[in-house]
Image: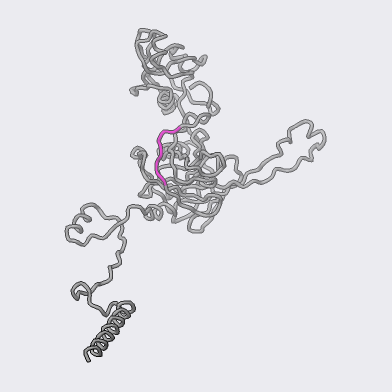
Amino acid sequence: MWRRTWLLFAQAVTVSLAALFVVATLKPEWLPRNGGSTVLPLPTLTQAPPRAPAAASSEAASGSLVPVSATSFSHAARRAAPAVVSITATKLTRNPHADDPRFRFFFGDRAPAPQQQLGLGSGVIVSPEGYLLTNHHVVSDAVDIEVQLADGRGTRAQLVGSDAETDIAVLKIDLGSLPVIELADGRSLQVGDAVLAIGNPFNIGQTVTAGIVSALDRTQRGNSPFQSFIQTDAAINPGNSGGALVDAQGALVGINTAIFSRSGGNMGIGFAVPVDTARHVMEQVIRGGKVKRGFIGVDIRDLNAELAESLALPVKSGVLITGVLNDGPAARGGVRPGDVVLRVGDKAVTNSAELLAAVAALPPQSQAQLGLQRGADSLSVRVTVGERPATARQAPR
């Protein structure tokens, strides 16, 4: 009898355990957990735009802080992108052999007519009156310039003027209700600041790329001495030339102008003309049609401690005059080879770049006081500043 009872009990336990296993596997929510408490699903968090520090701290104190993201530059892109345009410049190219006497002997006047060549680039609207900034190399020698706005409107542009030394050109369009970009204060830009490059690379349409300021005051060997670039790793490609480099607030900090590349494409080293330089060029071009720079007519080199010792000079830094242009402004003012320039007006100069910048900033026909070291003597001379010739890239300063 007890054996039959035990068998029935064992079977009942087996069936109960099997049923519990099935329920736990297929319908676990039927079973109570954690002492019978109910488990609720996690809430979905909504990303909020960045807040001011005071607002964020008050939310944290109240226990209702919403996570925010500092990695989105959508606000900057929305502010700046409408003012960035695409530029198509039509240029005429001649047969390179057209002036060769042998070519003309065989073909006479039957040389092919000049062919049209389209150049692509970008530009930035900087005033409600329709002035645009772009690169000199984008529009140089163009016979026709077409501008396409981000809102779909298109128009022909007039070249107001350009400056090959800084690679900046100024265009003007005649349209109403123009989006205008804000100009930043270039002096506040620092290495490590986030920047966006906006333009029309490879003519695929307006594109925004992001990076940081990699370096400031970059110069490239063989280029104009007036080119001092912002270096960035934001992707810049052909077609971006003349486009905008903007900060995290969408204000213009530079005009994209060049890349360092072994392949022709982006390698993470791009260059932009600082906005302060572009603004200075634009103001002079609009006012007088061209940029006028000061010129005194000297050849120079940096003075270092070793050179100063060999010349028995009491100063260890400055700019050594190695040559003076005959009957040039410096020669007429009494500057001699071997003099060391220490000051232009009230501005101290310690190297060639500083002297060049200080002289170039002087208005032609103005008077400038140069502080010199001549051997053991300190003296000051007055120079009537000339105008730097357009072809003086490698000429005396």
Q: Which residues are magenta?
A: 211-218
- In the image, residue 193 sits, relative to residue 344, either above or below, namely below
214, 219: nearer the viewer: 214
267, 43: nearer the viewer: 43
Q: Main secondary structure of the magenta part?
A: strand
- Residue 232 horizontal/vertical position (percent): 43, 41
Going 47% across and 42% down the picture, which residue do you hit? Answer: 268
- In the image, residue 226 sits, relative to residue 181, either above or below, namely above
User: Looking at the image, can residue 131 be seen?
Assistant: no
Coloration of the structure image: one colour
219, 300: nearer the viewer: 219
- Residue 154 horizontal/vertical position (percent): 53, 55
- Image quarter (top left, top right, bottom left or bottom right) of the N terminus: bottom left
Left of 44 or right of it: where is 307? right
Left of 317 or right of it: where is 238? right
Direction bottom: furthest residue:
1
- Residue 374 horizontal/vertical position (percent): 39, 10
Direction right: furthest residue:
106
Residue 217 in magenta stretch: yes
- Residue 165 horizontal/vertical position (percent): 50, 33
